[in-house]
Image (cartoon, rainbow, N blue to C red):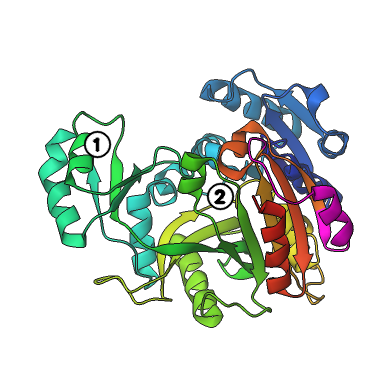
Amino acid sequence: MNYIFISPNFPETFYKIAVSLKNKGVTVLGIGDAPYDTLKDELKDALTEYARVNDMAVYQHMLDTCRYYESKYGHIDYIESNNEWWLLEDSKLREDLGVTSGFLPFEMAKIKAKSEMKKCFEAACIKTMRFVLVGGPEDLDAAISFANGVSYPVFVKPNVGVGATDSFKLNNECELRGFLKEKLPETYIMEEYVDGNIVSFDGLCDSNSDCVIALSNHFDTNSSDMVEEQSDDSYYIAPFDLPMKDIDASSFLEAGKRAIKAFGIKKRFFHIEFFVLNKDKEGLGKKGEFVGLECNMRPCGGNTTDLYSIALNASIYDVYADIIVDGVNSQDLSKEKYYAIASSKRNNLQYSNDINELRKEYEEHIMCEGTYPKGYSDAMGDYYLYSRWDDLDEGLLFDKKLRAK
């Protein structure tokens, strides 16, 4: 089996995907813009060959490299980046090389456009925020009518975009008029503002769109606020085996499974975001209910795949390799599960507690730590620490101490 891995070095922890695939007998062929000498030794050992391209955004260079691999190794079975930035390019490469595993270009609207995602949520019987698409002054009247109907504030972001980049909260008509004063660089989606916390449905599914692994990902900090305010970050993974305090776990699990079917996700990671309402929202839902936000056909950002493994007490990378090669999981997922917490700090902020003292006090809970690269640090912080806990309250107290100002 031949698997082309696009940008296998970013995020850094993705080298473990390559290692697990190689251990299953897969020929893993890398394409990236990083010099070979900068790759981790473990990644070098897992790759049968690595081709460097100067600019991965030049599609012809990527296609030529894939065709080279095809001529040398035979039919390509998979082309994957598992990275939001390259999902559209992945689909084009599959189409041009006749690779049938994975989404093709005609399916990408429901993956990339937030307005199209809403149709899939609706098909899964999941509520979503009301919206209108805007592109400039010509849409001002419709935008004002919409905002008056759902009440201010409203939230605007690119209809096709990654993360919280270029997202804004508009608090009144004056701000709305200012936003639409000139032609926007792209189409934006304007949604009713929701007072809620993000909880995502994460994991892996098989070729029948059935969950092999399902985890809940709870975000205590808002990503758009983090980018704007440059604050630090905290989120945690909770397996469905463990109690949850902020959501009806059974209903959430069933909704997540319906969403996977509606989006047609097969043999890949998923990260489906929901808002859990902090208070009643007329026309949308009651406090504690959840509404669909967006669906991402890749893992949560940063090194969250490591956090998945910490929570599962098993390698999610090995589970992924099993699904790719055999279609079913052979890993032992019956072991004790944990709450896994990701805490981050920023270099420009002053913290109250000495991190070395905290390391000593909580040594048995700390699983790994490191620094985020520039591509993630703006949205997630500079330094991260991952810990695991039997007791969620104890873990959240540690996170609070770590990030106390």
User: For the residue labelled by badge 1, is the local secondary structure a helix, a strand or a loop?
Assistant: helix
Q: Position of residue 219 (x, y in %)?
A: 56, 60
- The stretch drawn in magenta includes residue 348: yes
Question: Observer-nearest residue: 320 or 387?
Answer: 387
Q: Which one is closest to the eye, mark 1 or mark 2?
A: 1
Q: Is residue 90 left or right of residue 121?
A: right
The Cα atoms of the two marked residues, 1 and 2, are separated by 37 Å
Mark 2 is on which residue type?
Answer: Gly
Q: Quadrant of residue 287?
A: bottom left
Residue 179, disc: 1
- In the rendered structure, are the residues bearing label 1 and label 2 in contact, judged by CB atoms less than 8 Å apart? no
User: For the residue labelled by badge 2, is the local secondary structure a helix, a strand or a loop?
Assistant: loop
Residue 102, disc: 2
Q: Position of residue 386 (x, y in %)?
A: 75, 55
> What's drawn in magenta, residue-wise?
347-367
Q: Is residue 84 above or below residue 130?
A: above
